[in-house]
Image: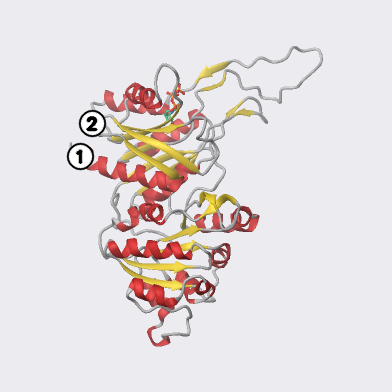
């Protein structure tokens, strides 16, 4: 049984929070609902009290004798705000405490998860983008909203994820040892609380850049989002996370041991160091397979009398495959992780399907798990959605996961937690 605070802010999706509350209750958790005053326009106190079986208040001036705003936050194992409006995220980012919900956020040491719901314009507004980035940098787990039908006729990013989907994303927090309260700092998870408690997980993320001259490079479009989501899910599961960041669009999550790298060869050094002594290595970074054979010290100029330059590429080391062979050479007795997880973006063709290509790559790379990202005509790059199949070298049945990158990350981390036990004991 966990003690959950369910914050409800003023969005039409508030009615879906009632279904989320039922899922919590059916799973045996104790839930205190804290609605914002404005959210009562959508769902009233009677509904929350009836479904939670607990008294419900919105203001710090009610039940003052129990010092409610501090008590609820202090006692919580998890604080979930669903739906989280642009307004409540702005107030949380600013550290305001002008109602019971935001006061509770300041007083809690438990993990905080927010499930935003709003119109696309509001979600994409620079103020909201900055607030979400700030909250995430403090360790708040902001679930990416779904893309789809919004209130009224419009559709786009900002839709409240289905209650079952949010419930699944919360699994790493709820599967933790019962009654263990959150953490030392707001938004952080106690290291002894989750399925990866005591484990060290090294995660590479982002894309490498291979310089051509002092101003140009060959790069790729990896944003680092999936790696960041994995790091947050691993932290939530209680792991110590060594995060090796190549180039990313977003800052690394708070709470990780961070190292950075630019080129594939630098990433190889950083990953190899981080992997030593770790229980798991997750290679979600997009590593350039090739680099320019020559780096030119001065900016390459387009002078009239010279022919157009030709760039010759040479192969970069395969970081993952090199670590797998080093581990094999040591007879598995070295200090490299017993569980190495690769990522692969695959498309099917006339000769074989995505999963056949994935299975072949899993064999070729020699790692224990491969997260195969199905890229195809109706699955687009650059979105917050992902669809993957996790393949296992030991013959465990493949696991399919789709939805937001947070959701996919939760599934990958859950699969890692399951796989780790036999690997460690074997
Ligand atoms: N990887 C790596 N070092 C490289 C290239 C890739 O460690 N030089 C890792 C990636 O981080 C990923 C996995 O290997 O976890 C699969 O990468 P991918 O590029 O899809 O595989 P390749 O073997 O390069 O196959 P392909 O020919 O399909 O690109």
Judge: label 2 CB < 8 Å from ligand 1.
no
Q: Are marks 2 and 1 in contact (CB under 8 Å)?
A: no
Q: Quadrant of the N terminus?
A: bottom left
Is residue 81 visible in the rendered image? The answer is: no
Q: Which mark is residue 361?
A: none
Categorize mark 1 by other alpha carbons within 10 Å: few (<14), some (14-19), many (20+): few
Residue visible at 48% across and 85% down in the picture = 61
Q: Is residue 315 above or below residue 272?
A: above
Q: Which residue is at the far bottom?
A: 65
SS at mark 1? Answer: helix
Secondary structure at badge 2 equals loop
Location of the C terminus by quadrant is top left
Outermost right residue: 304
The answer to which of 122 and 426 lies nearer the viewer is 122
Task: Say above or below: 113 vs 209.
Answer: below
* Nearer mark to the viewer, of 2 and 1: 1
Residue tagged 2: 333
* Percent of width and height locating residue 267: 47, 33
- In terms of depth relative to the viewer, which is nearer, 274 or 16? 16
Check disc 1 and report the residue beneath it: 422
- With respect to residue 402, does 182 lie above or below? below
Front residue of this view, candidates 148 and 213: 148
Q: Is residue 341 visible?
A: yes
Q: Residue at x 31, y 46 (%)?
A: 414
- How far apart marks 2 and 1 lie (CA) works out to 16 Å
Q: Ligand 1 sits in which quadrant?
A: top left
The residue positioned farthest toward the front in the image shown: 153
């Amino acid at each position: 049984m966990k003690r959950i605070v369910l914050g409800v802010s003023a969005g039409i999706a508030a009615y879906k929070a009632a279904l989320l509350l039922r899922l919590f209750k059916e799973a045996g958790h104790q839930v205190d609902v804290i609605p914002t005053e404005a959210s009562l326009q959508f769902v009233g106190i009677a509904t929350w009290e009836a479904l939670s079986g607990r008294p419900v208040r919105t203001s710090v001036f009610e039940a003052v004798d129990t010092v409610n705003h501090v008590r609820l936050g202090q006692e919580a194992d998890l604080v979930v705000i669903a739906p989280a409006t642009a307004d409540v995220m702005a107030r949380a980012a600013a550290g305001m405490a002008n109602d019971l919900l935001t006061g509770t956020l300041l007083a809690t040491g438990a993990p905080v998860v927010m499930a935003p719901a709003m119109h696309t314009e509001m979600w994409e507004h620079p103020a909201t983008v900055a607030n979400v980035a700030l909250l995430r940098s403090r360790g708040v787990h902001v679930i990416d909203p779904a893309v789809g039908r919004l209130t009224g006729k419009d559709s786009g990013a900002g839709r409240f994820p289905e209650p079952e989907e949010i419930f699944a994303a919360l699994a790493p927090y709820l599967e933790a040892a019962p009654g263990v309260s959150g953490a030392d700092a707001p938004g952080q998870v106690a290291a002894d609380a989750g399925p990866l408690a005591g484990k060290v997980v090294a995660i590479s993320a982002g894309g490498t850049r291979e310089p051509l001259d002092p101003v140009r490079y060959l790069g790729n479009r990896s944003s680092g989002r999936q790696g960041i989501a994995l790091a947050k899910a691993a932290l939530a599961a209680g792991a110590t996370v060594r995060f090796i960041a190549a180039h990313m669009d977003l800052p690394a999550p708070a709470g990780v041991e961070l190292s950075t790298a630019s080129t594939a060869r630098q990433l190889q050094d950083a990953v190899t160091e981080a992997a030593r002594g770790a229980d798991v290595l997750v290679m979600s970074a997009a590593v350039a397979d090739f680099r320019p054979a020559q780096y030119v010290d001065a900016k390459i100029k387009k002078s009239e009398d010279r022919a157009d330059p030709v760039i010759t590429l040479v192969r970069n080391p395969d970081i993952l495959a090199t670590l797998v062979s080093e581990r094999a050479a040591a007879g598995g007795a070295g200090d490299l992780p017993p569980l190495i997880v690769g990522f692969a973006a695959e498309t099917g063709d006339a000769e074989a399907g995505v999963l056949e290509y994935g299975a072949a790559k899993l064999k070729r790379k020699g790692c224990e798990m491969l997260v195969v990202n199905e890229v195809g005509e109706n699955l687009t790059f650059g979105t917050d959605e992902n669809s993957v199949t996790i393949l296992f070298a030991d013959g465990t049945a493949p696991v399919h996961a789709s939805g937001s990158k947070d959701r996919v990350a939760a599934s990958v981390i859950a699969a890692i937690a399951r796989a780790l036990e036999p690997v460690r004991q074997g």
